Image (cartoon, coloured by chain):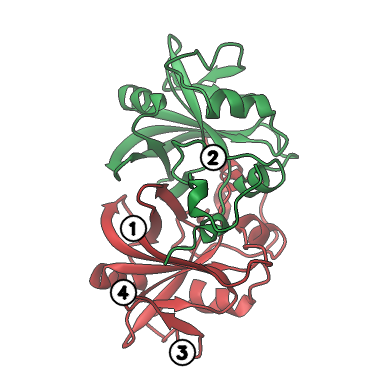
Chain colours: A red, B green
């Protein structure tokens, strides 16, 4: 038996994963970012196949990870989590730096960022796991705490978009969330 | 340039990943547990190739994930994080339940557990990513908070074992940790 509430006990951070180039880039809110090796440092990000950023990562062979601050603006979640780059230029008006690989790195409400070169792509069904070797990592604000998925859910009453690997349909929960 | 301190801004939980069977089982402390798809729910765990539990996961084709409580006993970290199952039976004296697949599930200081059937194994260099479909998930204690890697590091002054994907040699840090 699967008690879906148990899945909320798994801890995650919240990030904007970006890719593309100066001409056209995109990014999405992700909670599935994690280090997979130490020597050399490699990171994995999990991305829905339908996600527009998937295309950019495949084409550019690189991605960025912006670690969001605990007090990150709700506007960022609306823009990067619940809209598609197919319909709107998500980076328009956003503070962006371009990495060594040319990928856009979102700096709004970002306490640290990482830039990775794509090494492997793993098909896990509805999603792809992109595994990249770390090229650069920088801290922008060492005083602020990173935003966690738990804080986003419990305190800020945020929900996961349908494309997220951790999306749970409300019908599967015994206790219905109030948001 | 890589500022290794930036890697500490990535959020993780802390878990005991178990595998094997009633005859012989093993488990290790992991912070690399994450959901990769929602339909069906699949989870990934990252495990050093030298890790004894890797062998059990390959052989049994299944693994368990115990979500540790914020107040989990330091003894658990010593036993499951810094000793090898090659030298000692880590499950001796531990409260264990056996899942549908026969894998041991550690219940000590566990607030929720998951059982997964291995579907894919991905070689990422020093580590393997095991991807499993979720068979069972249960909450044991809904009142206690899950332990996060940040709390373990910052408040409990815990360190990562050398086998961990997030291990950082102190020589790479600008500000040397005091522990």
Q: Secondary structure at mark 2?
A: loop
Q: In this rendering, is residue A52 above or below B113?
A: below
Q: Are marks 4 and 1 in contact (CB under 8 Å)?
A: no
Q: How far separated are the C-alphas under marks 3 and 1?
A: 28 Å
The CA distance from mark 2 to mark 4 is 31 Å
Residue B11 at x, y = what percent?
57, 54
Q: Residues within 10 Å of mark 1 (few under 14, many from 20)?
A: many
User: Gap in Å between the C-alphas at discs 3 and 4?
Assistant: 20 Å
Q: Residues within 10 Å of mark 3 (few under 14, many from 20)?
A: few
Mark 3 and mark 1 lie on one chain; the one further toward the N terminus is 3
Residue A92 in the figure: left or right of residue B109: left
Where on the picture, by quarter, is residue B45? top left
Q: Is residue B120 visible?
A: yes
Q: In the image as oriented, which residue stretches furthest toward the left? A: A59
Q: Please state which of the two labelled residues, at mark 3 or mark 1, is closer to the viewer.
A: 1
**The furthest residue to the right:** B143
Chain letter behind tag 3: A
Q: Residue at x 33, y 58 (%)?
A: A133
Closer mark to the observer between disc 3 and disc 4? 4
Between the residue at mark 2 and the residue at mark 3, the CA separation in whole angstroms equals: 40 Å
Q: Which residue is mark 3?
A: A92
- For image coordinates 35% across by 29% down, the residue present is B50
Look at the numbered disc 3 and give the secondary structure of its residue: loop
Residue A133, label in figure: 1
- Cα distance, mark 2 to mark 1? 20 Å
Q: Which mark is residue A101?
A: 4
Q: Residue at x 31, y 74 (%)?
A: A101
Chain letter of disc 4 in the image: A
On residue B160, which mark appears?
2
């Amino acid at each position: 038996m699967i008690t879906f509430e148990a899945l909320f006990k798994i801890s995650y951070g919240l990030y904007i994963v970006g890719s593309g180039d100066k001409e056209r880039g995109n990014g999405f809110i992700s909670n599935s970012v994690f280090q997979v090796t130490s020597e050399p440092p490699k990171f994995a990000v999990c991305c829905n196949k339908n996600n527009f950023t998937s295309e950019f990562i495949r084409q550019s062979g690189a991605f960025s990870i912006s670690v969001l601050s605990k007090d990150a603006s709700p506007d960022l979640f609306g823009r990067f989590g619940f809209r598609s780059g197919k319909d709107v230029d998500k980076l328009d008006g956003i503070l962006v730096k371009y990495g060594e690989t040319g990928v856009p790195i979102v700096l709004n409400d970002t306490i640290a960022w990482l830039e990775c070169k794509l090494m492997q792509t793993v098909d896990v069904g509805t999603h792809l796991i992109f595994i990249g070797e770390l090229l650069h990592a920088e801290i922008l604000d060492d005083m602020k705490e990173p935003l966690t998925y738990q804080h986003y859910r419990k305190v800020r009453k945020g929900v996961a978009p349908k494309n997220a690997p951790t999306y749970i349909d409300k019908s599967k929960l015994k206790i219905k969330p109030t948001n």
